[in-house]
Image (cartoon, grey):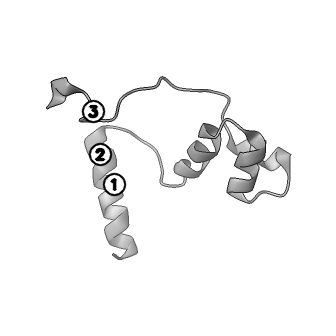
Amino acid sequence: MSISELRGGFDRAREKAGVSFQFRDLRAKAATDTEDLHHAQKLLGHTTRAMTEQYTRKRIGDTVKPVGANSENK
């Protein structure tokens, strides 16, 4: 798979889902979801805690089921 194919698929999925974010935002999201700053620092490869704190967000969203996991959607 080429980079342009990957990018095109990502853009189409994002449009279909009705969300607006960049591919690079997934990095900060992964760090935030660990809920452990030390682990996030290792995950991102940062040498300082301060740098990791810039990437992580102090918000936790609602927990939802993935698409298709609800029996009503079947």
Name the residue furthest bottom.
2
Residue at 68 percent of width and 29 percent of height: 58
- Measured Cα–Cα span from mark 3 to mark 1: 24 Å
The x and y percentages for residue 4 are 35, 71
Residue at 34% over, 54% down = 11
The amino acid pointed to by label 2 is Glu
Q: Earlier in the sequence, mark 3 or mark 1?
A: 1
Q: Secondary structure at mark 2?
A: helix
Badge 3 amino acid? Ala
Q: Quadrant of residue 43?
A: bottom right
Q: At 33% across and 75% down in the image, what residue appears?
A: 1
| Badge 2 vs badge 1, beta-carbon distance below 8 Å | yes
Place residue 32 in its image quadrant. Answer: top right
In the image: residue 12, left or right of residue 2:
left
Q: Residue at x 70, y 47 (%)?
A: 40
Residue 57: % across, % down = 66, 34
21 left or right, relative to 51? left
First in residue order: circle 2 vs circle 3: 2
- Report helix, strand or loop for mark 1: helix
Residue 46, image x, y percentages: 78, 57
Mark carried by residue 11: 1
Q: Quadrant of residue 64?
A: top left
Work out how far the residue at label 2 is from the one at label 1, CA to CA, in angstroms: 6 Å
User: Mark on residue 15?
Assistant: 2
Left or right of 74, for residue 70: right
Element on which disc 3 rests = loop
Q: Is residue 73 above or below residue 45?
A: above
Which label was assigned to residue 69? 3
